[in-house]
Image (cartoon, rainbow, N blue to C red):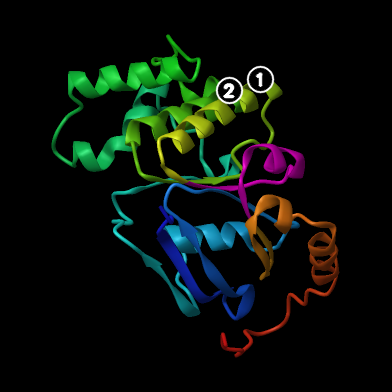
């Protein structure tokens, strides 16, 4: 059975003001695929992911979803640096917040939902952490909390922005096991990563980006030396004062 595209990107350009961040990206993520997005710093990886989530609007082109409700069927994990941990919220409340659409504005958290949250914390190795404040956690422990929240969401599409940055090796291994579990459940998973060795070992598909698309396909082919050389050369030629180009996809 041939996999069907679940997210299609068509001639996508995203800008900050008039400064281009992603140029004319074209391709698709298949249903049930496990894809790494890689590239140098400043390559537009997070920009691309935020456009897919709907946090940034395209300057040109579009993103199409096939059979997916972007508001309900996507679970998005931003970088830890973008999350304010100074707010006095507990681990349990943080995990349950992942189901805010299920809870609604007026309805309270049911015992069933709390039980699911406790089970999710246990699954990520944080049994008994429910009453602790998130500000008291290490970076690795907090990342486990965020993965527990993803478990509770049970979304068919999961987007992870640098999920293994600045955490210890044991936590990385445990969270990678969850990623593999989700892949085995036919979820569509997209992750921004920096460790090419990890990508080669765990991610069958890769999107190589340097503001423009260099390659997108099987990881072994995408991370070939010739493509990595193109990536380096393109990153050396970036002009942050350039305005949006007007090139159209053929």
Distance Cα–Cα, label 1 vs label 2 = 6 Å
Q: In this view, does 202 lie to the left or right of 94?
A: right
Quadrant of residue 90 in the image?
Answer: top left
Q: Is residue 194 magenta?
A: yes
Q: Where is residue 138 in the image (x, y as percent from the top left)?
A: 61, 23
- Residue nearest the observer in this picture, 130 or 158: 158
Give SS at disc 2. helix
**Vertical arrangement, residue 222 with respect to residue 194, above or below:** below
Q: Residue 39: percent from the left, percent from the top? A: 72, 57
- Left or right of residue 90, residue 45 in this image: right
Residue 54 appears in the picture as rendered? no
Q: Label for residue 231?
A: none
Say whether residue 69 is left or right of residue 76: left
The magenta span reads 189-206
| Residue 48 among magenta residues | no
The answer, for residue 233, to whether it is visible in the render is yes
Q: Mark 1 points at which residue?
A: 170
The residue nearer to you, when weighing 12 against 243, is 12
């Amino acid at each position: 059975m041939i996999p069907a595209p679940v997210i299609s990107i068509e001639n996508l350009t995203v800008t900050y003001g008039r400064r281009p961040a992603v140029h004319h990206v074209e391709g698709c993520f298949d249903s049930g695929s496990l894809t790494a997005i890689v590239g140098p710093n400043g390559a537009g990886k997070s920009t691309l992911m935020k456009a897919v989530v709907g946090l940034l609007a395209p300057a040109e082109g579009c993103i199409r979803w096939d059979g997916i409700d972007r508001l309900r069927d996507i679970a998005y994990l931003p970088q830890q640096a973008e999350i304010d941990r100074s707010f006095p919220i507990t681990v349990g409340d943080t995990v349950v917040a992942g189901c805010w659409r299920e809870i609604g504005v007026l309805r309270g958290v049911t015992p069933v939902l709390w039980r699911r949250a406790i089970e999710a914390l246990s699954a990520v190795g944080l049994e008994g952490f429910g009453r602790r404040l998130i500000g008291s956690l290490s970076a690795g422990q907090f990342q486990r909390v965020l993965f527990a929240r993803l478990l509770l969401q049970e979304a068919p599409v999961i987007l992870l922005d640098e999920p293994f940055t600045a955490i210890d090796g044991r936590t990385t291994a445990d969270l990678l096991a969850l990623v593999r579990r989700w892949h085995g459940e036919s979820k569509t998973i997209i992750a921004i990563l920096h460790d090419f060795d990890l990508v080669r070992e765990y991610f069958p598909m890769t999107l190589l980006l340097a503001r423009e698309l260099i390659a997108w396909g099987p990881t072994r082919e995408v991370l070939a030396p010739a493509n990595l050389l193109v990536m380096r050369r393109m990153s050396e030629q970036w002009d942050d004062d350039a305005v949006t180009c007007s090139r159209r996809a053929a």
